[in-house]
């Protein structure tokens, strides 16, 4: 099997706010084409880790290295939805196009290459027919597709998804998981923060589990399922850590 | 009807009425452009707070007897805008209280200063016109008109050049930051432009009514239109039409300029609200 390109390497990271450590000893690697699922309870440091991976926050100690042509700002990010967005008057096309903003630099307007990229990504996620629709009138699942298309405009190698299925009905959740899986099979590295252990085990190739201020597990999904911690979480409460 | 037109024609022969019209329409245009962003970012309260700060600064300017009051009002308001933005970002709830504190404080101290130091015989009238802008739009000098035109042109130019950035930062700050967009700088730009607009708009509607000028056209447009660009354009059109109509009505019926414009804005908001009910129907 050919050696896959190393895209993110996190060594001995300790993360937190103003000297207060939320989680320490985080150690993992992400290779091109991986599907990494980051599991952990609320408050376990998942969102802090997300910020660190995006380069918005430096770790208290340890380091996060990017490689394989992934620079700062070249991770496609799907943030959790905010209250502001649910009621936002903007067309789908405007939102997808805004993913290209990082490429414009000081240029005030989008060029034709960026507009084409936006159109291509809308096609890819099957939302071309929604292009002129208003974002706030879409269903939750459609909104997430729009934001995914925007993330793909920003970066086409690696996506970081923060709790992407929150608030969706079961059917829409499954659709979105399958879509993400399809993107992964087409060669896009996926890092997904979640507390849905069932989906993680079903779709991910690797699992990073944090909790109790430290890293509980990192490795392939198959190893996780066999590990004591993996087993205990999968068995408990039908697998949802939070409930 | 022809009476009214004749009356308007007569009034428009006076340069001060022409000045008022030009400045009024430009201010209405500028305030509506940023209104959409301020409303969507939940920054409306900053506009309100700043207008009170501007009143306080104007009181200081009156007391010092400086001829060009803008020299004091503009820097103070811009500085407060930056300060308010910072506190508002740190902790949402404390930010609210900070705005309330600064704005009410500025209002109280401003009135106190004018009362103690003013040499004018009609203090109550002065204060009233600063708060509700009854006459200051009609007493603009040619230099002030040019200053307003220049500032308005700068605001519009910045808005057009930064349009896509403002959109991205308004819609999703965390995503913008993650893709390397310097959202803090654009927030700062938004705050500074807001401050400039508020200082300009004080002339037209007075400091208490500025928020209305910023908020109503945006809220009306957002009820009906579905893309960001169309909302912005619609809100600009509403704002300009309401300002123009309000000023003409106030000439014809001798009503206070500021309140008449805001009343027109409220009427349009109600109309758009009803339209949106039917559309959803």
Image: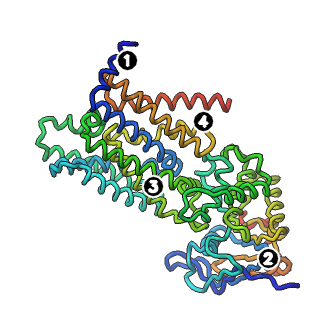
Distance, label 4 to label 1, CA atoms, is: 33 Å
Front in this rendered view, residue A238 or B162: B162
Identify the mark at residue B5; answer none if there is no mark.
Answer: 1
User: Contact, CB < 8 Å: mark 4 with mark 3?
Assistant: no
Instruction: Write down the chain letter for disc 3.
Output: B
Left or right for A76, reference A174: left
**Front label number (1 vs 2):** 1
Q: Quadrant of residue A217?
A: bottom right
- Whole-percent x and y of residue A2? 86, 84
- Note whether B114 is above or below B90 in the view shown: above
Q: State the SS at label 1.
A: helix
Q: Which residue is mark 2?
A: A206
Left or right for A2, reference A57: right
Front in this rendered view, residue B97 or B109: B109
Q: Are marks 2 and 4 on the same chain?
A: no
Instruction: Write down the chain letter for disc 2.
Output: A
Distance, label 2 to label 4, CA atoms, is: 46 Å
| Residue at figure coordinates x 26%, y 50% from the top left | B70
Q: State the SS at label 2.
A: strand
Instruction: Write down the chain letter for disc 1.
Output: B
Identify the mark nearer the N-term, 4 or 3. Answer: 3
Q: Which residue is mark 4?
A: B224
The reply to whether residue A36 is visible in this rendering is yes
Identify the mark at residue B33; answer none if there is no mark.
Answer: none
Distance, label 1 to label 3, CA atoms, is: 40 Å
Give the class, few, some or many, for how many residues have Cα within 10 Å of label 2's Cα (few <14, many ≥20): many
- Whole-percent x and y of residue A178? 83, 61
Give the class, few, some or many, for how many residues have Cα within 10 Å of label 4's Cα (few <14, many ≥20): many
Instruction: Write down the chain letter for disc 4.
Output: B
Q: Which residue is mark 3?
A: B190
Q: Are marks 1 and 3 on the same chain?
A: yes
Give the class, few, some or many, for how many residues have Cα within 10 Å of label 1's Cα (few <14, many ≥20): few
């Amino acid at each position: 099997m050919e050696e896959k390109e190393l895209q993110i390497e996190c060594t001995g990271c300790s993360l937190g706010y103003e000297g207060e450590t939320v989680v320490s000893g985080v150690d993992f690697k992400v290779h091109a084409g991986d599907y990494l699922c980051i599991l952990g309870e609320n408050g376990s440091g998942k969102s802090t880790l997300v910020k660190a991976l995006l380069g918005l926050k430096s770790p208290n100690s340890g380091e996060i290295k990017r490689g394989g042509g992934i620079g700062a700002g070249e991770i496609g990010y799907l943030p959790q939805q905010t209250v502001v967005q649910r009621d936002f008057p903007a067309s789908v096309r405007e939102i997808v196009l805004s993913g290209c903003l990082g490429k414009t630099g000081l240029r005030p307007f989008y060029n034709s290459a960026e507009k084409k990229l936006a159109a291509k990504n809308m096609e890819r996620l099957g939302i071309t027919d929604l292009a002129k629709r208003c974002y706030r009138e879409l269903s939750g699942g459609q909104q997430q597709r729009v934001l995914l298309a925007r993330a793909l405009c920003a970066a086409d190698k690696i996506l970081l998804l923060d709790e992407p299925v929150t608030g969706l009905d079961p059917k829409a959740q499954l659709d979105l998981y399958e879509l993400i899986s399809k993107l992964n099979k087409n060669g896009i590295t996926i890092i997904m923060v979640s507390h849905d252990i069932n989906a993680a085990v079903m779709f991910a190739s690797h699992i990073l589990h944090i909790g109790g201020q430290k890293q509980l597990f990192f490795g392939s999904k198959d190893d996780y399922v066999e590990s004591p911690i993996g087993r205990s979480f999968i068995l408990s409460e039908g697998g949802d850590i939070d409930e | 009807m022809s009476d009214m037109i004749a009356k308007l024609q007569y009034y428009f022969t006076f340069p001060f009425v022409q000045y008022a019209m030009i400045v009024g329409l430009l201010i209405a245009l500028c305030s509506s452009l940023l209104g959409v962003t301020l409303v969507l970012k939940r920054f409306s309260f900053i506009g309100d707070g700043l207008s009170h700060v501007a009143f306080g600064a104007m009181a200081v300017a009156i007391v010092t007897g400086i001829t060009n009051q803008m020299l004091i009002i503009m820097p103070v308001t811009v500085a407060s805008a930056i300060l308010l933005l910072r506190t508002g970002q740190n902790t949402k709830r404390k930010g609210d209280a900070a705005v309330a504190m600064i704005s009410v404080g500025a209002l109280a101290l401003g009135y106190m200063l004018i009362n103690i130091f003013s040499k004018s015989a009609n203090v109550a009238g002065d204060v009233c016109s600063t708060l509700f802008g009854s006459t200051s739009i009609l007493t603009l000098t040619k230099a002030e008109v040019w200053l307003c035109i220049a500032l308005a042109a700068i605001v519009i130019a910045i808005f057009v050049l930064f349009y896509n950035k403002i959109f991205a930062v308004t819609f999703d700050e965390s995503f913008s930051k993650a893709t390397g967009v310097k959202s803090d700088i654009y927030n700062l730009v938004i705050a500074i432009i807001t401050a400039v607009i508020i200082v300009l708009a004080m002339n037209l509607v007075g400091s208490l009514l500025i928020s209305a000028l910023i908020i109503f056209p945006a809220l009306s447009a957002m009820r009906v239109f579905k893309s960001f660009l169309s909302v912005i354009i619609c809100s600009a059109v509403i704002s300009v039409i309401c300002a123009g109509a309000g000023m003409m009505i106030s000439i014809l019926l001798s009503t206070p300029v500021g309140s008449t414009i805001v009343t027109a804005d409220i009427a349009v908001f109600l109309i758009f609200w009803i339209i949106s009910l039917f559309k959803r129907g």
